[in-house]
Image (cartoon, rainbow, N blue to C red):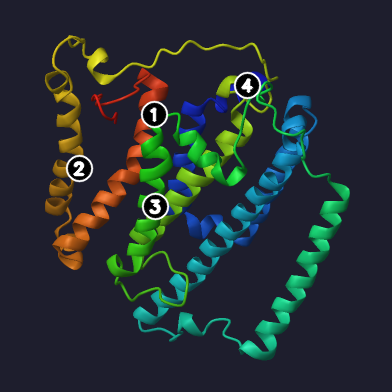
Amino acid sequence: MIDFLNFLFDPRISFSLVIFIFFLILKFYKIITSLKFSVLLGILILIYFIISCFNENFKKIITKPDNVAIAFMLFLVIFFTYLGLKKASLNDVAKKLENNGGTKSNPKAIEKVHVWPELVFRELIVMILVTVFLTVWSILLDAPLEEPANPTKTPNPAKAPWYFLGLQEMLVYYDPWIAGVLLPLLIIFGLMAIPYIDTNPKGNGYYTLSERKFAVTTFLFGFLILWVFLIIVGTFLRGPGWNFFSPYEKWDTYKVEPLTNVNLSEILGLNPKSHWIIRELPGFFLLILYFFGLPLILAILKRDFYKSLGFLRFVITIVLLLIMLALPIKMFLTWTINLKYLIVTPWFNI
């Protein structure tokens, strides 16, 4: 059984399963968020977690002071994702009844309360409970303070704080200037551009999925798959030497994996002594096809979507989407064919 779990936590398998489960949830979110199914699924997840804690290696990783908060955060992510999909399911049914001429119900009016005293009083109670919880937590669990920084003793693995683990994981697949500067800036730019790109008035003030499939799917994919999952990988699956280890596998400090990553020109067998422009022509061709050919194809296939956005907003949306999808594509290429760079120039690498 442990061998099978170790196989499932292989990044190629686990990442593929996570993507498959993600789209499966969005496809059948009404069934999954039903009371019976959600309770059964929650019980199964809790049973799995409890049984796994009997494994020494799993328990050591989960109970590490640095990781306790992250494990707790994962349960919060699952809960609030479920809550959002549940609200979307209820509102989708209400909108369907309204559109079919049935009982009119405005999703914006669901659970509408006055700010005072209902909302403010609830926030006060939650604030007190959270304060008590954090106080008890700080008493029972010691802070993971280590010795002062010592340049002669580097921890292995050296991990960033949990909120930077996603960026640290991206450094494996991209140059530092891309993973540490360009991609974070594009994430901020993309979030700032959302109100100007997405002018669809539907869903304002209430959760809905049927009316905003593209927007909800894109946001959840970026947040859950390309951020939360990368944090999980960096926290629970990366060990000494930044090698992959299953949560049920003992960390071997002496585990060494040869660096066999190769560039696209090397995979194609091109002459490394030729001029870099000629050598990197296949990489430039793939990038041009990806960032110029795909938007053109999508504009032809999805004419209604193109017309609804207009030329400028369509181009910005698709380019940001392709940049986001480039990360999982690069991850799979690195894991399968050991691809390092598409393009290698004297100044930068892509």
Instruction: Choose mark 4 or mark 2, whichever is in front.
Output: 4
Q: What residue type is labelled 2?
A: Phe
Q: Position of residue 335 (x, y in %)?
A: 42, 23
**Quarter occupied by the N terminus:** top right
Indicate which disc, 2 or 3, sits on the residue closer to the N terminus.
3
| In this picture, residue 155 sits left or right of residue 260 | right
Q: Where is residue 268 in the image (x, y as percent from the top left)?
A: 21, 14
Indicate the secondary structure of the residue bearing disc 2: helix
Instruction: Choose mark 2 or mark 1, whichever is in front.
Output: 2
Q: Position of residue 66 (x, y in %)?
A: 71, 40
Q: What residue type is labelled 1?
A: Phe
Label 2 to label 1: alpha-carbon separation: 19 Å
Residue identified by numbered label 1? 332
Residue identified by numbered label 3? 187
Tell whether label 3 touches label 1 (CB within 8 Å): no
Indicate which disc, 4 or 2, sits on the residue closer to the N terminus.
4
Q: Residue at x 71, y 38 (%)?
A: 48
Residue identified by numbered label 2? 291
Q: Which residue is drawn at 35% across and 23% down?
A: 340
Q: Is residue 214 above or below residue 59?
A: below
